[in-house]
Image (tube, grey):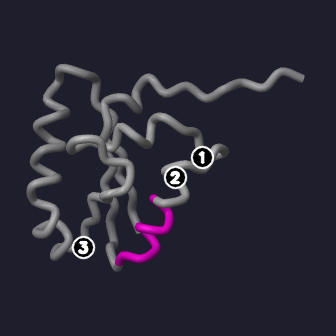
Amino acid sequence: MKIYIHIGFGKTGTTSIQDSLYRNNELLSSQGFLYPKTGLRGTGHHNLCKYSPHEGGEFNALVKEIEAQNSSTVIISSESLHSKKQKSSKA
């Protein structure tokens, strides 16, 4: 399985890409692509940016959706991902 993560900066056409992927979801699915429903806010996966994988949230549901599909390629897109920073832990 391949996973493509589209991390576009705002105002660079990201919304147009997301709209196209969302509108063509059935066609993409017939070609082995999954544009997951989990994490969508509008047509982008902006809700995935709210949580880290450690916190669960949408990530657990996303993993379940991916595992349930018979897709060879997953596409995730959100311009909010470019500014997502990992929390650092201090010893």
56 or 11: nearer the eye? 56
Category of crowding for the residue at label 3, using alpha-carbon neighbours closer than 10 angstroms: few (below 14), some (14–19), many (at least 20): some
Task: Establish if 68 lies above or below 23.
Answer: below
Q: What segment is highlighted magenta in the picture? A: 62-69
What amino acid does circle 3 point to? Gly
Q: Nearer the viewer, mark 1 or mark 3?
A: 1
The quadrant in which the N terminus is found is bottom left
Q: Nearer the viewer, mark 2 or mark 3?
A: 2
64 or 82: nearer the eye? 64
Task: Establish if 3 lies above or below 7.
Answer: below
Residue in the image at 35% along x and 37% along y: 46
| Displayed quadrant of residue 10 | top left
Mark 2 element type: helix
Please tell me whether the stretch drawn in magenta is mainly helix, strand or loop: helix
What amino acid does circle 2 point to? Phe
Please report whichever mark, 2 or 3, sits nearer to the chain's N-terminal start: 3
Residue in the image at 40% along x and 40% along y: 47
62 or 82: nearer the eye? 62
Q: How far separated are the C-alphas under marks 1 and 3? A: 25 Å
Residue in the image at 39% along x and 57% along y: 3
Mark 1 element type: helix
Mark 3 element type: loop
- Label 3: which residue? 32
- Label 2: which residue? 59
Please report whichever mark, 1 or 3, sits nearer to the chain's N-terminal start: 3
Q: How far separated are the C-alphas under marks 2 and 3? A: 21 Å
The quadrant in which the C terminus is found is top right
